[in-house]
Amino acid sequence: MLALVHLAKHQDEGPVLISKIAEEENIPQKFLEAILLDLKKDGMLASKKGKGGGYYLIKSTDEVNMADVMRLFDGAIALLPCVTFKYYERCEECKDEETCGIRDTFMEVRNQTVDILKASTLSQILKK
């Protein structure tokens, strides 16, 4: 997320070199290269080669939210596989999902967590 915040802060300056982000945000460059590549593949960033090259945001800061970033790097946001949005799996020990009180509780936790993370956009983070 630090790299995204850095790019958002400098978006009016054009593409930013990986080495500059790594140095200013104290992120190992090899690690950062992998992160930026994943963000590029996901459609949040683009890159330009050559002189004046680097990475830059292609989505607006209002479109990039913590839920999307977390799902990209960490997978499911939910704490149980039976309440995940994109990674659903039935719990092995579950007898009836429709009446499972545990599932209902964790579904509520997941829904509130996702709402908070979706509201946490780059533009909101920059304002704080």
Image (spheres, grey):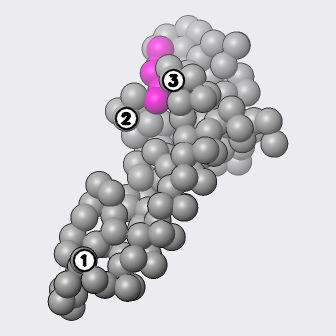
Highlighted magenta segment, given as a residue range:
44-48
Identify the residue shown where x is 41% and y is 70%.
107
Residue 60 occupies quadrant: top right
**Inter-mark Cα distance, 1 to 3:** 38 Å
Percent position (x, y) of residue 102? 39, 85
Look at the numbered discs 1 and 3 and tell me whether their residues touch, using CB distance below 8 Å.
Answer: no
Per the image, label 1 sits on a secondary structure element best described as helix
Provide the residue designation for mark 2: 42
Quick check: 29 above or below 21? below
What amino acid type should be assigned to the residue bearing mark 1? Glu
Give the vertical position of 92 relative to 56 (above or below): below
Please name the amino acid that badge 2 sits on: Asp
The residue tagged with tag 3: helix, strand or loop? loop
Residue 118's label in the rendered image is none
Could you tell me what secondary structure mostly forms the magenta stretch?
strand
The quarter of the picture where the N terminus appears is top right
Residue toward you, 108 or 74: 108
Q: Position of residue 98 (x, y in %)?
A: 24, 77
